Amino acid sequence: MKLILRSDRKGVGKRGDIVEVSDGFARNFLLPKGHAIKASDGAVSQAGAMRRARDLRDSQDRESAQTIASSLVAKTITIAVKAGAEGRLFGSVTAADVASAVEAQTKIALDRRKLHIEHIKTTGTYSVIAKLHHDVEFPISVEVVAK
């Protein structure tokens, strides 16, 4: 069955795409939940408008992510935590800690789920990867110091 997706569906397509799915998947899930509409002549032109809006929003998101990346790459974020005598931390530094430190020091709010962090259990300098957009991925330099 040919359908036009009204929302992004993982494994199926993005909003505005015209997709061919099985009849059962369309009847039992996509159509009743409002995730898709049947592809008719009028709906196909509506799908074009959805794709254009999606592309415009995607380009705006990419530009804002690149602006944030250019401002954060040059900075070093400092996080002060409790540590033992040999530099081992009491606990660890998490993505939420990094996100709150970035917001406190630069006034840029980052989502902790967009940060890919290795296990930080000792003091030192680390690189945390931030992926704000599927095209924009950059490192954030994080320095962990003892209180």
Image (tube, helix red, strand yellow):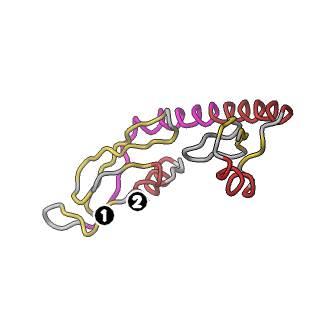
Residue type marked 1: Val
| Residue at (69% x, 57% y) in the render | 28
Which is more toward the observer, 91 or 2? 2
Three-letter amino acid code at disc 2? Asp
Tell me residue 43's x, y (percent): 82, 36
The reply to whether the magenta stretch includes residue 100 is no
Residue 97, numbered circle: 2
On residue 118, the disc is: none
Image: 20 above or below 107: above
Is 35 situated above or below 42? below
Q: Position of residue 62 (x, y in %)?
A: 57, 33
> Which residue corresponds to the image point at 73% horizontal and 47% vertical from the top-left?
36
Question: Is residue 71 covered in magenta?
Answer: yes
Tell whether 73 sits left or right of 133. left
In the image, residue 78 sits, relative to residue 74, either above or below, namely below
Q: Secondary structure at mark 2?
A: helix
Estimate how packed mark 2 is, as few (under 14), some (14 to 19) or many (20 or more) residues with alpha carbons within 10 Å: few
Q: Is residue 3 left or right of residue 103?
A: right
Q: For the image shown, how many numbered marks are present on the structure?
A: 2
Q: Which mark is residue 81?
A: 1
